[in-house]
Image (cartoon, helix red, strand yellow):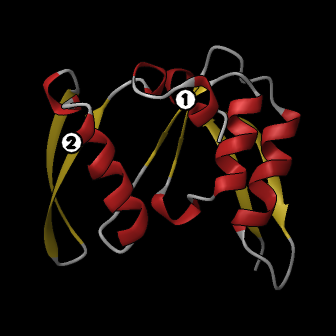
C-alpha cells in the first residue's frame, strides 16, 4: 500500500503538493519535505494532532506563515503549557472561540477551539522557540 501526505487548499478544493511516505516510516518524516516545496507565505497551515512536533512547527514558522495545530487530551504536557499560557494572559477573554459537536466512530465528540495570536502573548525570544 502507498501512503501519501498531501497539502490541501481548502478554499480552492485543490491538492497543492504530495509526498510519498517511505516504507517503515510515517507522515511526520515527510511533512518537512512537503513544507519545503510549497510557498506558504500568507497561508494558514493546519495539521492534525498526531503530527504536532516542534520541528514541524519551526518549519512552518520559517515559511513565514500562520498555523493552527490541533491539541488533544493525550498530549498532557503540551496541554498544561497551553492552559498555563491562556491563564497567565487571561487569553480566553480575547480569544476567538468555536464549538463543534460531531458524531462519528461510535461516539459524540465536542470540540472547543480557542484561537489567539501567539505574537500578542509571547516575547520575541519565546516566539522564536
Labels 1 and 2 touching (C-beta < 8 A): no
With respect to residue 82, does 43 lie above or below?
A: above
Q: 81 and 105: which one is in front?
A: 81
Label 1 – label 2 distance at C-alpha: 37 Å
Residue 27, percent across and down?
Answer: 71, 65
Residue drawn at 83 percent across, 61 percent down: 20
Residue 14 sits above or below residue 48 on the image: above
Horizontally, residue 68 falls left or right of residue 55, namely: left
> Where the C terminus falls, by quadrant?
top right
Q: Which residue is mark 1?
A: 13
Q: Residue furthest bottom?
A: 24
Residue drawn where x is 27% and y is 51% of the image:
83
**Which quadrant would residue 9 be assigned to in this image?**
top right
Q: How many marks?
A: 2
88, above or below 48, in the image: above
Of the pair 13 and 94, the residue shown nearer to us = 94
Q: Which residue is mark 2?
A: 87
Tell me which residue sits at (78%, 73%) in the image: 2
Amino acid at each position: 500500500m502507498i501512503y501519501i501526505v498531501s497539502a490541501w487548499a481548502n478554499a480552492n478544493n485543490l491538492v497543492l503538493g504530495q509526498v510519498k511516505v517511505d516504507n517503515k516510516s510515517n507522515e511526520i518524516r515527510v511533512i518537512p519535505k512537503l513544507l519545503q516545496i510549497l510557498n506558504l507565505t500568507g497561508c494558514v497551515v493546519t495539521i492534525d494532532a498526531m503530527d504536532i512536533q516542534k520541528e514541524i512547527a519551526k518549519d512552518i514558522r520559517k515559511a513565514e506563515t500562520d498555523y493552527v495545530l490541533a491539541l488533544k487530551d493525550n498530549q498532557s504536557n503540551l496541554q498544561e503549557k497551553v492552559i498555563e499560557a491562556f491563564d497567565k494572559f487571561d487569553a480566553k477573554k480575547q480569544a476567538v472561540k468555536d464549538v463543534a459537536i460531531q458524531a462519528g466512530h461510535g461516539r459524540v465528540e465536542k470540540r472547543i477551539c480557542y484561537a489567539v495570536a501567539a505574537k500578542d502573548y509571547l516575547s520575541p525570544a519565546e516566539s522564536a522557540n
